[in-house]
Image (cartoon, rainbow, N blue to C red):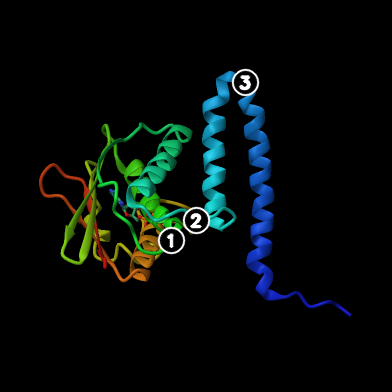
């Protein structure tokens, strides 16, 4: 008789197998690290593996401090730019050191990585991205603006719906980044909006979060 598999283990077994994938990448990174020409790339791979493990829940979640999460997200996107041979972005941070976010830092890292990655992929000229916060009574407002081409007008109305994308990707997985952003912000009772800047062009994303 065939033994029935417990469907509740599907997440755990996925983590198990992905950890094996990470193990291979880690071993490869260690090999690269022994050659001084590849040390930077080895470090990039190491950070990407740690990020993957954090997302999987295989590493403990950090404290949800906004400035620290933004720094981790910037590091991830800088790593992407190096590996994908994209020009580096210039980051302008206007984030006080003591702003705490609700919930899990892993969730917020996904929010910022998705927003920053889109800028890295959209900008054509020397890219600049600015992260600002403003506290208005019991609302924290975080704005992320860039100097890229702006969001195409035809997709702006339904931008946060799944599979809305201008990227040609035959895997069918494009157009999920902003949906992930909106779902996480909603989970913490917040709102996210997108617009194009009137002066100077570029996109602007605004996250409003209730804070106690
Ligand atoms: N900062 C930005 N500048 C210009 N266009 C953007 C920006 N962010 C998002 N977009 C547009 O929104 C679309 C959807 O983004 P997203 O949901 O992350 O999916 P994907 O990146 O896979 O296309 C992108 O394809 C792009 O056209
Ligand atoms: Mg995206």
Q: Secondary structure at mark 1?
A: loop
- Vertical placement of residue 193 versus 169, above or below: below
Residue denoted by label 2: 61
Residue 162 on image: x %, y %: 39, 65
- Vertical placement of residue 80 versus 36, above or below: below
> Mark 1 near mark 2, Cβ–Cβ under 8 Å?
yes
Residue denoted by label 1: 104
Q: Which residue is nearer to you in this view: 123 or 50?
A: 50
Residue at far right of view: 1
Q: Secondary structure at mark 3?
A: loop
Snapshot quadrant of residue 85: top left
> Mark 3 near mark 2, Cβ–Cβ under 8 Å?
no
Label 1 crowd (10 A; few <14 / some 14-19 / many >=20): some
Give the mark, 1 or 2, whose residue is nearer the N terminus. Answer: 2
Residue denoted by label 3: 35
Specify the quadrant that holds the C terminus. Answer: bottom left
Label annotation for residue 152: none
- The residue shown at (33%, 52%) is 66
Specify the quadrant that holds the N terminus. Answer: bottom right
Label 3 crowd (10 A; few <14 / some 14-19 / many >=20): few
- Measured Cα–Cα span from mark 3 to mark 1: 37 Å
- Vertical placement of residue 140 versus 9, above or below: above
Q: Secondary structure at mark 2?
A: loop
Looking at mark 3, is its residue's CB closer than 8 Å to ligand 2? no
- The residue shown at (64%, 40%) is 25
């Amino acid at each position: 008789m065939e033994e029935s598999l417990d469907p509740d283990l599907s997440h755990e077994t996925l983590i198990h197998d992905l950890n094996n994938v990470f193990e291979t990448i880690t071993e490869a990174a260690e090999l690269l690290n022994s050659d001084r020409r590849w040390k930077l790339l080895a470090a990039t791979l190491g950070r990407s593996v740690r990020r993957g493990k954090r997302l999987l829940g295989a590493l403990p979640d950090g404290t949800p401090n906004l400035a620290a999460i933004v720094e981790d997200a910037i590091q991830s996107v800088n790593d992407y730019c190096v590996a994908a041979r994209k020009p580096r972005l210039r980051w302008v941070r206007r984030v006080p050191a003591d702003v705490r976010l609700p919930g899990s830092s892993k969730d917020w890292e996904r929010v910022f990585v998705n927003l920053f990655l889109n800028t890295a992929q959209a900008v054509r000229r020397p890219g600049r991205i600015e992260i600002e916060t403003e506290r208005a009574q019991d609302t924290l407002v975080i704005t992320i603006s860039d100097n890229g081409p702006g969001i195409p007008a035809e997709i702006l109305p339904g931008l946060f719906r799944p599979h809305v994308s201008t990227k040609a990707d035959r895997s069918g997985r494009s157009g999920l980044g902003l949906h992930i952003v909106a779902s996480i912000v909603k989970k913490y009772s917040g709102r996210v909006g997108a617009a194009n800047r009137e002066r100077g062009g570029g996109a602007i994303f605004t996250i409003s979060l209730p804070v106690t």
